[in-house]
Amino acid sequence: MSSISSDSFENTELAFVAKSDWQLKKAYWLFRIVNNNTVAKISTRVASVSLKLHLPIKGMIKKTVFEHFCGGESIEKSKETVHTLSKYKVRAILDYSVEGKHDEGAFDAALMETLRTIENAKGNEEVPYCVFKPTGMGSADLMEKIQLQQELSEEEKKSFERIKNRYLVVSQAAYDNGVRLLIDAEDSWYQNTVDELVYEMMEKFNNKRAIIFNTYQMYRWASLQNIKDAHQRANDNKFVLGAKLVRGAYMENERERAGIKGYEDPICTDKNETDKNYDGGLKYCVENISQIELFNGSHNEHSNLYLTELMKKHNLPKDDKRIFFAQLYGMSDNISFVLADADYNVAKYVPYGPVKFVMPYLIRRAEENTSVAGQSSRELKLLKTEMDRRKKAKI
Ligand SMILES: Cc1cc2nc3c(=O)[nH]c(=O)nc-3n(C[C@H](O)[C@H](O)[C@H](O)COP(=O)(O)OP(=O)(O)OC[C@H]3O[C@@H](n4cnc5c(N)ncnc54)[C@H](O)[C@@H]3O)c2cc1C
């Protein structure tokens, strides 16, 4: 395929080329369930409670929602998914999606698991990045206290030293193995602490190319300026800025907390403002591509198309090593497979981990895909189009 237009994302044959008829049907029914807000709410609640009570539903979750949105229960068990994606030039980013464990033992375990993903990605063309979540490596409460410049107890000071050390160990491993490392963004009330840790790692390890990437949630109105400030810091300190752009997944919590605590809402006033901010971020990064490497994490068709147009305008090759497009596994295959087929660099975040512990991740995906949030009706329409197309092709 030569160039991308908005029609390109309608190509369901290409979008679902990796899915068997049976997988397609399963995905269709899954999105139909999720599309019904009440049914989606009840099913996710029942699933979480049943798992907590050790009721035998793991098999059912595994065969349905888990298989659709996750690669497997371990790095090893996710390999088949990774190989399948790579047959179609879609790369994978293994994302250890165990959430909700917040003690020093769990932070050390997350560190070890991130090191295993780096080892797995070393020299592996199929896996271009590794990733971790800030709350996997340290306490959100402690990071918030630091952001608020509150005095720390001796114990808290030691905990913070351990957080810093975890960042250093994973970043050093990423650097030594030539693997790019993304640090996700979560809540704004401790993001400044994360930013500072990440920029310190960039100063150490991004001297020749971007190894360490910070995440900018463009639903925060301040994010475009944050990118510009980070770019200035990169210029001053002679490092390459690694910028991962997303719109942001925690809008309701952010607004609610700002309302309760009485500070200015950090989120853009409406979706249109977020969209403008996002595309402004893409534009800024592409205009400064000699000092910024860009990771575009979005399911928004317009923003993905816009990035291809920006690349064309700036005469950048489609497979420019400094630019990646990325979507979540199980969502927006019409964007991922179409862009990969057209020779752009594309990767999927492939979550993995024991079924029981990735439930919070799966519930977030279900919520994001309800008819209120909007994405599921698009997925449903595409799946139905492809099912009909295959039926006709068999006649
Ligand atoms: C590869 C990848 C990595 C990701 N990593 C992270 C991460 O580290 N941190 C994180 O938070 N999220 C992350 N996400 C999730 C991402 O933030 C959501 O997928 C995203 O919010 C959905 O936006 P979209 O760009 O796909 O487009 P759309 O579906 O067009 O946009 C939906 C988004 O717009 C914003 N929005 C909606 N309504 C309003 C409103 N009224 N006012 C203001 N803004 C509004 C919200 O951010 C909402 O999620 C990641 C996603 C991908 C694909």
Image (cartoon, rainbow, N blue to C red):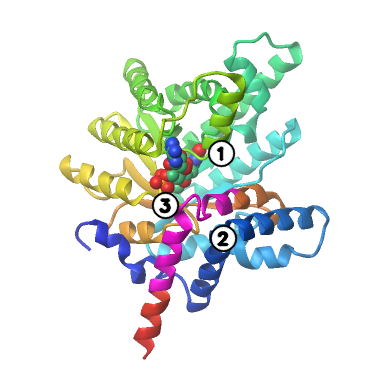
Residue 253, quarter of picture: top right
Residue 369 drawn in magenta: yes
Q: Nearer the viewer, residue 45 or 142?
A: 45
Residue 248 picture location, percent across and down: 47, 38
Q: Residues within 10 Å of mark 3 (few under 14, many from 20)?
A: many
Magenta-highlighted residues: 364-385
Amino acid, disc 1: Phe
Disc 2: which residue: 36
Q: Judging from the image, what secondary structure is the residue with disc 3 in?
A: strand
Quick check: 231 left or right of 65? left
Labels 2 and 1: the sequence-earlier one: 2
The structure residue drawn at horizontal position 32% and vertical position 48%, both measured from the top left corner, is 304
The structure residue drawn at horizontal position 35% and vertical position 45%, both measured from the top left corner, is 324
Q: Judging from the image, what secondary structure is the residue with disc 2 in?
A: loop
Residue 142, quarter of picture: top right
Labels 3 and 2: the sequence-earlier one: 2
Disc 3: which residue: 347
Residue 53 drawn in magenta: no
Q: Nearer the viewer, mark 3 or mark 2?
A: 2
Q: Judging from the image, what secondary structure is the residue with disc 1 in?
A: strand
Residue 143 picture location, percent across and down: 62, 22
Amino acid, disc 3: Ala
Disc 1: which residue: 132
- Real-space Cα distance between discs 3 and 1? 16 Å
Task: Give the dominant element type of the magenta stretch: helix, strand or loop.
Answer: helix
Labels 3 and 1: the sequence-earlier one: 1
Q: Is residue 122 in sight in this rendering?
A: yes
Q: Residues within 10 Å of mark 2 (few under 14, many from 20)?
A: some
- Real-space Cα distance between discs 2 and 1? 32 Å
* Position above or below: 192 against 25: above
